[in-house]
Image (cartoon, helix red, strand yellow):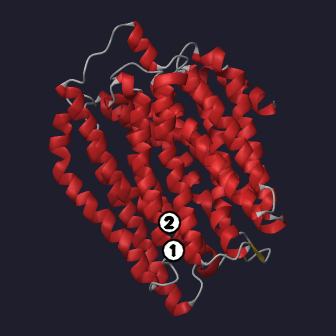
Amino acid sequence: MAACLITGGILEKGNYLKDHPKGLYLLFFAELWERFSYYGMRALLMLYMVKDLMFSTEKAGAIYGNYTSLVYVAPLIGGYIADRYWGIRRCILVGSILISMGHFTLAFSDLRAFYVGLLLIILGTGFHKSNISTLVGSLYEENDPRRDGAFTIFYMGINVGALISPFVCGYLGERIGWHYGFSAAGVGMLAALFIYLWGQKRYLGDKGLKPVHSINKNNNEKKSLTGIELKRIMVIFILAFFNIFFWTAFEQAGSSLTLFADRSVNRVIPVINWEFPASWFQGVNPFFIIAFAPLFSRLWLTLARKNMEPSTPMKFVWGLCLLGTGFLFMILAAKLFLSAGPVSLLWLTCSYLFFTLGELCLSPVGLSMVTKLSPAKFASTMMGAWFLAMAASNKLAGDFAGRYDNMEMTTFFSVPFATALASALILLMLVPLLKKWMHGVH
């Protein structure tokens, strides 16, 4: 209830609503708390499996990869159900309830509860994730120049939740008890549910109430896809392919980079001689997102007004290059650790800085791109397909992280460095073709 009151107070302040509809800020807060629950649990997951369940790094990495990949497979099904049967709003409600149940199930100290909890979160995220992103896109007309900025603001909400959660859930889990941390994630998801129920009618109107299929049927819109629509869909799939390279490397944050933070970074604060939890490093990336997202949101809008904004494919190229730069810092940190022992936290912090700058060039822009290029009757389904690429990357990321103990450390971090830069070069050569196939969508 307190979360709803705070949200309502902010929504009613006009200075927050100068450029965007109020519905954006409602979804901002709902997604903030949903992501609090997801990233709070994720900050603990790898450490919990290795330290409490006593899984090997290889087994824990495989489970981590399977879980995070299925979290991104499920939205394809949830998007289809939203488009054909339930509508976006009902799917988000069902998803929120299932996710809450999943986190509280993890609070039980039982191996069966562990797997059931993961399954419930996967199912719930399937209904929630792609549909809330599509709902953001529905607030704007086609070619509205505010759309990329809106998704950057929405993305900042994701990362406010991701910033808070490692400190709350991570501290409770590592220092008091693992299952207290999982319970805190469940409380965050309940906050998301209450905010959504409180504000959906007030700020969203009739957006997302009916499945797009039924609207098209009522309007007798049963036309097949045009050539332009097919080319735009091809752009989505090609960029989704390159998205896999980005997130396979980036998602080391929750696995191998967490192990690096736990084993290879000096985490002692000298003044008070206190070692902070390794899971707290999961808050560095969202901190930088919050710091830089408003700047990127304003940057894209300013460049668009001057007809200087880079195309979406070009933003992806920059994202991959910045990601590769971040892994260059990890290669240097690994070399230093192997020669002199635990390294300064600044090395990992610098890596996360460049990861974040790359993420801001690629991830919110990608979400916006899907809503702009997708045919209206397939909007949620295409968003699910976009997340399917992220599912593949999370599976690959988990499998690769499982090799952390079996590879020389500098070699391990050299792999994502090389793949990020190589994929950026290939995509750069495809930029003119992709811009042509977008047919005027900016």
Horizontal and vertical percent position of residue 103? 72, 49
- The residue tagged with tag 2: helix, strand or loop? helix
For the point 42% across and 78% down, the residue is: 412
Horizontal and vertical percent position of residue 306? 28, 30
Q: Which residue is mark 1?
A: 402
Dot 1 alpha-carbon crowd within 10 angstroms: few under 14, some 14 to 19, many 20 or more: many
**Residue 341 to residue 301: above or below:** below
**Residue 348 to residue 238: above or below:** below
In whole angstroms, how far apart are the C-alphas of marks 2 and 1? 6 Å
Question: Is 109 left or right of 146, judged from the image as shown?
Answer: right
Dot 2 alpha-carbon crowd within 10 angstroms: few under 14, some 14 to 19, many 20 or more: many
Is residue 209 shown to the viewer in this render? Answer: yes
Q: Could you say which quadrant of the image residue 52 lies in?
A: bottom right
- The residue tagged with tag 1: helix, strand or loop? loop
For the point 60% across and 84% down, the residue is: 342
Disc 2 + disc 1, Cβ < 8 Å: yes
Q: Which residue is mark 2?
A: 398
Q: Amino acid at mark 1?
A: Gly
Horizontal and vertical percent position of residue 90? 61, 25
Question: Is 113 left or right of 323, judged from the image as shown?
Answer: right
Quadrant that contains the N terminus? top right
Q: Residue furthest top?
A: 219
